[in-house]
Image (cartoon, helix red, strand yellow):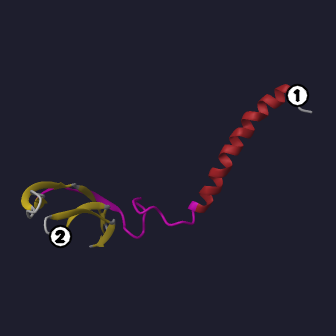
Amino acid sequence: MLSTRALRLSIPVLAVALAVAPAAALAQDAATADPHPKMPWNPYHGQILQYVPVPPQSVTIEVAVPGEPGEEPKMQQQVVQIPGYTVTETTLGYIIPPRYTLRQVGPGQWQWVPLPAEFRKK
């Protein structure tokens, strides 16, 4: 049987070993996986050269405003700001992050649409 002193010393060692074991197993799988697309060593996108900010855009749209019952909706101008984003320029092209834009879905009706991330070659 272990003495109390030996037991007190072995518990922290065992706790550290159990905490590190899952991390070591995960690290082995990561060595064979593709690199993260945002990391500078990504062979598909090349080395990062610079970050190019794309400023927000103010857009004037016409929105349908409901009128009295029985009347047709009136059109009213409204200024909306499309959010900006940052493009990453690499040696092979441009990494464009996910972003939002406006799409007209009907007369006086607009909808925010998510655009996916993309890579455009130079």
Question: Which quarter of the picture shows residue 82?
Answer: bottom left
Residue at 7%, 57% (x, y): give it. Answer: 77
Measuring from the top left, give residue 54's x and y in whole percent: 20, 57
Separation of residues labelled 1 and 2 (CA atoms): 79 Å
User: SS for tag 2?
Assistant: strand
Measuring from the top left, give residue 109's x and y in whole percent: 17, 64
User: SS for tag 1?
Assistant: loop
Within 10 angstroms of label 2, few (less than 14), some, or many (20 or more) residues? Answer: few
Residue beneath label 2, please?
Answer: 106
Residue at 11%, 54% (x, y): give it. Answer: 79
Please state, as top left, top right, bottom left or bottom right, where the C terminus lies in the image: bottom left
Q: Which residue is at the far top? A: 5
Q: Taken as a whole, is the magenta stretch helix, strand or loop?
A: loop
Residue at 62%, 51% (x, y): give it. Answer: 23
Within 10 angstroms of label 1, few (less than 14), some, or many (20 or more) residues? Answer: few
Question: Which quarter of the picture shows residue 38?
Answer: bottom left
Q: Which residues are magenta?
A: 30-59
Please state, as top left, top right, bottom left or bottom right, where the N terminus lies in the image: top right
Residue at 40%, 70% (x, y): give it. Answer: 44
Would you say residue 64 sits in the magenta stretch?
A: no
